[in-house]
Amino acid sequence: MSPLQKKLRLSDEALVRISEAVAAAEKSTDGEIVVAVAKESSRYSFWELLASVLSALVVFAALLPCAGIARSWFESKMWTVPDWYLVALYGVTVFGLIAAFFQVANVPFIDRIVVPRFVQEDAVSARAFRLFSESGVHNTAHHSGILIYLSLLEKQVRILADSGISARISADLWALISDDIAADMSCKSYESAILNGIEKCGQLLSQYYPAQKSEGDELPNGLILLENAGWA
């Protein structure tokens, strides 16, 4: 069981149920449904480092008035105190704080605070569009694929529809389903959230894009688990 599968509390049986739900939803439509869950949509290293440096600078500024106390402590421990001792102490302290803050900034809760919201939204959209291409959703015979993409760190959902479907179904309807999935995910009932999302997408597709052709399954039905901001 992968780390992301454990985080989602999805057993192997749950993955089978999700795959079966996709197959069932596709029976009454020519649309193809692909579902993916990502741990995060970007690494956000720049913003984590920036927050770490700024935090260390704040501490450094707070320590400046204490320079006399530090020098007095050195003088109490040795006969002479080279000038560079105090500089070295502050330098080691600042770089140590940057390293410590950078580790803390990697915690998802902190990430959501230090990374601007618009940056998160752009990263989720970009990763969803990239997966839309990488997974072949854009390459079905009748351009009838949709991607349900969930990104855990950012707590955001995207539903992308290919041109054959977007010509018939308004983006506002997909947005409503995305909001419903996000609301279910917030309750940490991950399997139910995914299954409900698949069911609602299937109902919408069967209404606006009913089955007329019989190409069969063009895309895999199983849940795609993205452990990092890359492909796997």
Image: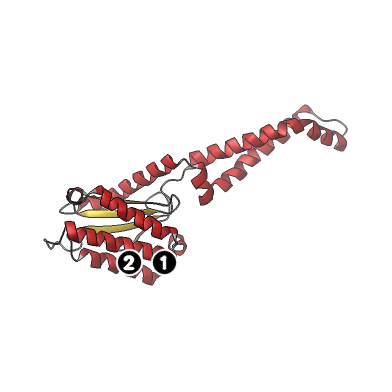
Which amino acid is tagged 1?
Leu
Which amino acid is tagged 2?
Ile
Helix, strand or loop under label 1: loop
Estimate how packed mark 2 is, as few (under 14), some (14 to 19) or many (20 or more) residues with alpha carbons within 10 Å.
many
Q: Going by the picture, which residue comes out furthest to the left?
A: 212
Task: Name the quarter where the C terminus is drawn.
Answer: bottom left
Task: Name the quarter where the N terminus is drawn.
Answer: bottom left
Residue 42 appears in the rendering: yes
Query: Which numbered circle lies on residue 164?
Result: none
Query: Which numbered circle lies on residue 18?
Result: 2
Q: Identify the residue shown where x is 28% and y is 50%.
A: 132
Residue denoted by label 1: 10
Residue 221 appears in the rendering: no
How far, Cα to Cα, is label 1 from label 2?
10 Å
Q: Which residue occupies the foreground of this view, 179 or 107?
A: 179
Helix, strand or loop under label 2: helix
Q: Work out whether 174 lies above or below 210.
A: above
Image coords of residue 141 (percent x, y): 15, 54
**For residue 221, side relative to residue 79 (left or right):** left
Q: Identify the residue shown where x is 66% and y is 37%.
A: 59
Image coords of residue 230 (percent x, y): 39, 49
Q: Quadrant of residue 118?
A: top left
Image coords of residue 175 (percent x, y): 30, 50
